[in-house]
Each structure stands twice: as C-alpha cells, then as structure tokens.
Amino acid sequence: MPTTTEITDPADPRIAAYRDVRERDLVGRDGHFIAEGEVVLRHLVQSPRHKPLSLLIDQRRIDGLADLLAQLAPDVPVYTAGQSVLDAITGFHIHRGILAHGMREAPRGAPALLGSLGSRALVVALMGISNHDNMGGIFRNAAAFGADAILLDSGCCDPFYRKAIRVSVGTALTVPFAQLAAGEDIVDVLATAGFTVIALSPGGETELSSLQRPDRVAMLLGTEGPGLPTPVMARTRTVRISMAAGVDSLNVATTSGIVLHALTRTT
Amino acid sequence: MPTTTEITDPADPRIAAYRDVRERDLVGRDGHFIAEGEVVLRHLVQSPRHKPLSLLIDQRRIDGLADLLAQLAPDVPVYTAGQSVLDAITGFHIHRGILAHGMREAPRGAPALLGSLGSRALVVALMGISNHDNMGGIFRNAAAFGADAILLDSGCCDPFYRKAIRVSVGTALTVPFAQLAAGEDIVDVLATAGFTVIALSPGGETELSSLQRPDRVAMLLGTEGPGLPTPVMARTRTVRISMAAGVDSLNVATTSGIVLHALTRTT
C-alpha cells in the first residue's frame, strides 16, 4: 500500500489541479487532464502513453483500491479526503470518490498515426463532433469493435475532457487518435494515407448492409442536424443506414456502433 | 396566431406546473409531464394520444413557431416570458426556450398492446433500465428502425421524464409502450403473446449476424454491468454481439441500435 496524504483543507495548494474541475476543464489545459472512476484510473495506471501526476481519493475507497495503487509509480502522490472535503475541492458531488490528475503524451500527427497502421485497418474519422457525450460514446464503440485509430478534424472537442473520458469508460486513454489543425482537409489526409473514405449520410448511395469493406477504410461521421458538408461527401463513397419513414437521423455515437458492427462483421 | 399571455412574475400561479421542474420531475406526477424543445412540442401537438395542457415559451421564439401554434387547440393557454423569468421559473437555464406541460393518455396494459400487433412484429423489451439518457436513446432507436412497441418491466424508469423525452427527440410520445407491474414476468408476458424472446448478452449462444429473425420477436435488454439475470436468460434465445478482446460491453442504447439494425436488415 503506498503512502497516502490526507487533505483536510479544500484550499490546500497540493490539490490545486482538482479545484473547481467543472469550470476549469473547459479552458486550456496544456496536456493535463482530470479523470474519474475506478475503471478509468485503471486504464491510466496501466497506460504506456499517459501518466498519472497525482490521485485524489475518498478515504473510504482506499482499501478497495490496494491492488491498483500498488501498480502506481512510487513518486505519484495519493491524496485522500472525506466526501465533504472532496466535494468542496471539486465544486460538485464526486459520486465515485476517485479522481486522477494526468498528463497526456504529446499528440501524434495524423500522417504518423495513419502510417503506423497495417494494410488492413479501420479508422473512425470525425468532423465537428463537439458534444462530449457523443465523443466518449464513439471512443467506447471504437474500442469495443477494435477500430485501429480515431482521426478528429479541428472542429471536434477534446476527448480528454473529463466527461468524454468518463463516457468512454476510459477508452479515450487507450484508443490511438490524432487531431488535425484548422485548415487541414480530413478527406485529403486519409486519401494520402491510402484510406478509402466511407461517409455516413441519410441520403447515401449504398446501404450499409450491402457495403463491401475496403481493406484500409475510414468511416467519416459528422454532426447530427447539418451532417457532413456536400463538398466533403462528393469526394467520398456515401453510405446510408435505412430507417423508418419520417425519422430524421440516429444519434452519432449510435451510428458509429452500427457501422463498426457492420464493418467488422464482414471481416 | 393564438392569443398569448405574458408572465412577468416567476411566482405566477398559472405557470406553477413549470416551477422547479428539475426537482419536481422526479416525484409522482399522475400522468402529467414536462417536455421541451421544438421537435418535441411538434410531436405533442400532433399526438393522437397525449394532450398539451399549456405552453411556456421564450417570447423571442413565438414568431418562429406560428405554424405550430396555429395547430394548437384554442383552449390551450400559451404563456410567454423573457429568458430571465423563464430561468427563474424552472430553476435552470432553458436553452431552447420552449416548454410544454402535457397529460399522457392512460397507460395501456401489456396484453392489449402486444395483442394489437400484427403477425410480424418487433418489440423492444427492457429490464431495469433506470438511466433516462439510455431510455431516451432506446426510444429514439426504436422509432428510427420502426419497432412496433416497447415493453418495460417495473424496474425501468419513466420514459415521460423530461430528460428521457428530450434524448428520445420526442419519440417517447410516439412509440407505443407499456410497463409491467412489480412481480409480472416479462418473458412470460411476451411468450403468452406469441413472441420469441431474444436476450442480448456478451456470452450469448448465437452471434447477432447469423440470427434468423422470427416473425414475432422481442429483443430483451438489461442494464450494463449486471446484465440480465441468469434465470431470465435460461428461458430465452441468447444472442451476442462479437467485440474486441478485453472490452466489457456496449452502452445499452447503442446495443439496441445495433440489434434493431440487424433485425430490420434481414427483413
């Protein structure tokens, strides 16, 4: 069992990273992130790519986490606090009683990431996904069906936002991803790396069930509502999911699950 | 354009139904519900089954809703308020500026609902789904793929909770459903009505892709984590969705989308 340090003053400077998490999470974080919950902490502790800087844990949870804490590098401080101090630090009720402050690895460039994949590879490509629930859900599905990587355009939100990590059940820390800079064209980047781009759209030319999966394939998803821009779709193979009459569209995370299931099923 | 009544005092008794919506929504509501947003309001106004009792709308939105308000029965009051009064009434920021207070039709019994379906029918059956996001997402998927009805056991949350209606994009008001009483057995009820029950489970005997769809079929989903009870699964055909190694499970709403797509695809 590692040494733990009890925090009794919510203003203690040692736990400054956790203060008012909800508001601070939306501003520039310079590679730092906050993760919560046991499953996510487990992913972080075992990650070859990201690093825990400290933990802040409800003191009642410490005993149950002994095996996990034993895997932690000895220089990572483990702070404990009672529930009311925890809530005062973070500014809301931490239901699970487990928080980690982490530092992500330096972002990878898209060409390097795509170039590292094999001759048969599946990438999830996203344009303008700004909702953290959807981002987390898409990562979870990508992990569930073994997608090789996720590629984000500059209009997507950060998968390392606390809520996205939580909804992803920690897979935001495990599925490799890269994010393009503003002005970079996601279809061009994928095509240059040898990927066939399949764009999902309610009016797509091919029904998903009859799609023959290309070996190196990227499925491209846009936001609900506006969907993918027409000039983008014009440079891709468009695919639709048949739905009942009168229904607009599916949630984008659900769509990712349906397409991933279909593409990995035909493997 | 119907007559509207401007509300300037958040304590006005005429809009009592909207006061502190977030807290009140969790207590007994006796058939009343609160819905929000334009798409949901549209479903409510056109519903043959549920009735709007009043509307409360940001005054800046009134002009844009003229066509919808013209379809409203003339005895339904339309209250308007500025954003700050709206927020003071409801206790949180109403982003969309559109709220409706409605009364649902009397709940239907499961035997009547199931008996009304044709010789080829698809039902989504749920056990213990207590999360309103998941409930809303499942209704949305059921509508998207044309499921005929949803059957809930007594452990499920109410699909007419405000957040469930919102996530369902109003389909909680359109997809027929029934909820069992405590002690009623969901597998028995479905079997009696002539439905083959397909239970989704990570360890299911048949892979979803190779399932031949029975004509009258119910897909049974339980909560993430514990999943369906073993004695329940023992009386059903169990089906799995193949996933990558090391991944536990999918989100239950995503699962419903994948299964609905597969079952309607083989039609």
Image (cartoon, coloured by chain):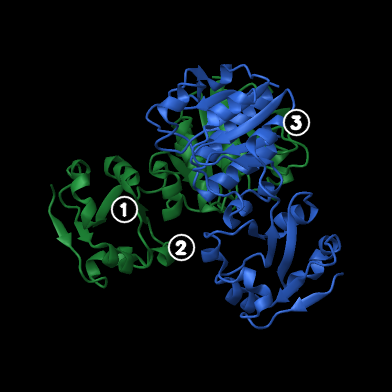
Chain colours: A blue, B green
Of labels 2 and 3, earlier in sequence is 2
- Which quarter of the picture shows residue A227? top left
Q: Secondary structure at mark 2?
A: loop
Q: Are marks 2 and 3 on the same chain?
A: yes
Q: Is residue A54 left or right of residue A110?
A: right
Q: Is residue A196 left or right of residue A119?
A: left
Mark on residue B102?
1
Q: Is residue B133 above or below residue A226?
A: below
Q: Are marks 1 and 2 in contact (CB under 8 Å)?
A: no
Chain ID for label 1?
Answer: B
Q: Which residue is mark 2?
A: B26
Q: What amino acid type is highlighted by mark number 3? A: Glu
Q: Is residue B35 left or right of residue A178?
A: left
C-alpha separation, residue under disc 2 versus residue under disc 3 = 39 Å
Q: Is residue B247 left or right of residue A231?
A: right
Mark on residue B205?
3
- Residue B265's spot in the image, x, y percent? 55, 22
C-alpha separation, residue under disc 1 versus residue under disc 3 = 44 Å
C-alpha separation, residue under disc 1 versus residue under disc 2 = 16 Å
Residue B164 makes an appearance in the image: yes
Q: What amino acid type is highlighted by mark number 1? A: Gly
Of labels 1 and 3, earlier in sequence is 1
Chain ID for label 3?
Answer: B
Q: What amino acid type is highlighted by mark number 2? A: Leu
